[in-house]
Image: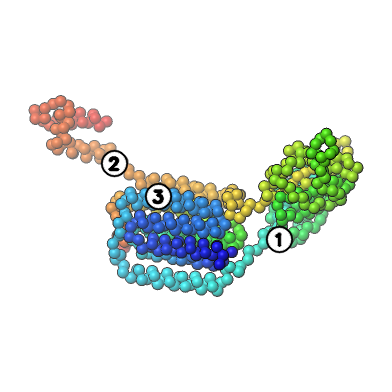
Amino acid sequence: MLQTDAYVMLSMVLFVLGAMGVMLRRNAILVFMSVELMLNAANLALVAFARQWGNSDGHLFVFFVITVAAAEVAVGLALIVAIFRTRRNINIDELNQLQG
Amino acid sequence: MATEVWLFILVGAIAVVAAVMLLLSQNAVHAALFLIINMGCIAFLFLLLNAAFLAMVQLAVYAGAIMVLFLFVIMLLGAERPGGRSPYGWLAPGAVVLALIFLVTVALALSQGGISDLQAPPAHPQLRVANLAADAGPVALRLNGSTVGDNLPRGSVQGYEALPPGEYELEVRAVDGRTLLSDSLALEAGQRYTALIYGTGAPELSLVPELAEAGSLRVFNGWGDAVWLVDFASELSDEDTVVLMADIAPGTLSDPLTVAEDTDFSNGALVNDLNEVLARTGAGMTLDALEGGSALMVLAPLRRFEGTLEATVDLLVTPSKASFGSPADIGLKLFNQYMLPMQIVALLLLVAMVGAIVLTHRPKVAPELERARLGRRRVSRPLTSAIASQLGQGGGSQDPDAAALPPAGTQER
């Protein structure tokens, strides 16, 4: 059986790539997709630990994370559509009206 | 190396490459397709980790529903074009440095921490109590002085209860508060036990640990004589009678008998050494409900109203532990332990749905504003002449405003 270490390391690499996507991409939809990638990486770590402990509570947690991600995507994409309607643009560097 | 390692390396590499391409691709549609590849790889890794149900959920919900939503919005907004250069030039090198620091930290923690050597603590032992006493009537159960069951009638079973391992003092009381029996039980971690209360007069207690292998049948003899478990294949002749278990001494447990899934015990019986039938196993006592679990058949006396003793057979089925990560396992936990979180998440989904509708809803302009706007435009030349021509009046013969406005007002209502 493959060690849990390997899965956690892969999960961390994917998480970091997702975090870099959030920092570097300027298109709001791509930022959002990077957040999904980070959630997926965390799910992978949860499932790996669930197998190691032989306890399927981790699977339940992943199930809830997927559900919450679905809700988040629904609201987030609606926000992006609403912003695009008023600004004709979803570049996050230009959405700075709240800046002091 | 084992196949699993090769599969992990291959699929993990595809997942990482897809994530890098998501980071680098200029076209948002390409990025979404790379993310779908990444999610497919993660679903495969879930399969490697014995999480079959989650792998299917991942494919259906993430790679299916959520990514379709993403692609839909990308195409709707026409946002697949690249965004241009960031005004913050220091961000890219800063992010790379932070990512490297994070990865080095995690690698150090993983190599030093020894996560893979951690062992899960063994599960708590589980205990259930069956009241099969002949004369006791309903009983109350007290474990180490605290009540765990109340008014448990004869022939019923108190369900499994998880307890920390150790020594317990089980006290059985009658309805009037008399202590019928008191005995100590030693419960070991990771084991499931059935405590049987049986016998005439002052009842006795027997603690039966569950077998590790599934699909077996055991008989506990709570009767005074040795018994045989036989299967009368035919009611009419004794020729086909099969002795399944022989000479089970009083107060003991038989050796396990491996039974097929659909074994029919409706013609079975427990007989004593004089070949007298003590109890029939009864119609409908089939073992098709075992589903990988095991069964315990208990022969115990029952006091009739007229004072005679009669042997009864009870079948206590031990359900199998649902296999790790299977839909049955997840479903059992979801509808038992995690009922409230599931309801909350369902509510959250509902709120998100309503929120998405509210956010993207384009409100209708108020009627008064709309009328004022239309009224102003109606003064202009082309529209009024068009309305006037619809009414069958010559455009040039009258004052255009006076002719056009009243019928236009009626049309609006």
CA–CA distance in space, label 1 to label 2 = 69 Å
Q: Amino acid at mark 1?
A: Ala
Q: Residue at x 15, y 29 (%)?
A: B389
Horizontal and vertical percent position of residue B36: 42, 55
B22 relative position to B240: left or right: left
User: In which quarter of the view is residue A47 placed?
Assistant: bottom right
Which tag, 2 or 3, sits closer to the chain's start? 3
Q: Amino acid at mark 3?
A: Leu
User: In which quarter of the view is residue B17 placed?
Assistant: bottom left
Label 1 with label 2: CB-CB less than 8 Å: no
B151 relative position to A72: left or right: right
Horizontal and vertical percent position of residue B78: 30, 52
Residue position for label 1 = B189
Q: Residue at x 81, y 56 (%)?
A: B183
B27 relative position to B1: left or right: left
Secondary structure at numbered mark 3: helix
Residue position for label 2 = B365
Q: Sort mark 3 into few (<14), some (14-19) or many (20+) by Cα contacts within 10 Å.
A: some
